[in-house]
Amino acid sequence: MKKTKDILYGGAIASSQYEGGYKEGGKGLDTQDCRHYLKRTSDATTSTRLLTQDIIDEAKKCEGIGHYPFRQGSDGYHHIDEDIALLKELGIDIYRFSISWARLYPHGDEKTPNEEGIKFYDHIFKEVHKAGMKIFLTMNHYAVPLYLVEHYGGWTNRKLGRIH
């Protein structure tokens, strides 16, 4: 297929839907890790967005994947290299992905980032660059470290915008 210079052909993922590895690489729990699977109904989105302390407590009791699909995602944490190779094979020009705040800062308010999280994303940047693709980075795609929700009230507290 002939490409024009005005159009970039891209692929995109959100860290919470793609990465999985919710307990690997020093990642802390985030709000998406506590969203359980719900059958599709007219209020499913509203139901999954409203995390009460009871829902959070129940999610924290579950040690594995359970009914929490975001904890596994598409298992990109373990397959990123082959997925980037597939994107390259497809002729993708730009790769849009998001960073998991809880993978870089497990509680969200640490003074220094999690080194394993830095290495994970650094590896992605290098592999995407080697594949000849541009990066379109999303800094936050819904997921907030659970600690910030439980200790600060999440985005209802204006301090969240000034943590880092």
Image (spheres, rainbow, N blue to C red):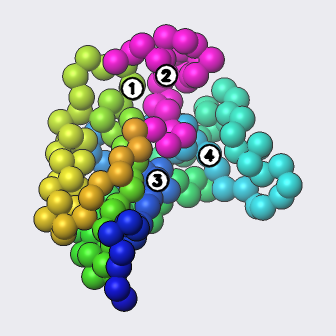
Kindly identify the residue that appears in the image at 40 percent across and 38 percent down.
139
**Residue indicated by mark 4:** 35
Secondary structure predominantly adopted by residues drawn in magenta: helix
SS for callout 3: loop
SS for callout 4: loop
Q: Are marks 2 and 1 in contact (CB under 8 Å)?
A: yes
Give the mark, 1 or 3, whose residue is nearer the N terminus.
3
Q: Which residues are magenta?
A: 140-164
The CA span between labels 1 and 3 is: 20 Å
Q: Is residue 83 above or below residue 35?
A: below
* Label of residue 14 in the image: 3
Q: Amino acid at mark 1?
A: His
Please tell me whether mark 2 or mark 3 is closer to you in this view. Answer: 3
**Residue indicated by mark 2:** 148
Q: Quadrant of residue 154?
A: top right
Magenta span has 157? yes
Residue furthest right as drawn: 42
Give the mark, 2 or 1, whose residue is nearer the N terminus.
1
Q: Quadrant of the N terminus?
A: bottom left
Q: Quadrant of residue 105?
A: top left
Q: Is residue 31 above or below residue 163?
A: below
Kindly identify the residue that appears in the image at 73 percent across and 56 percent down.
38
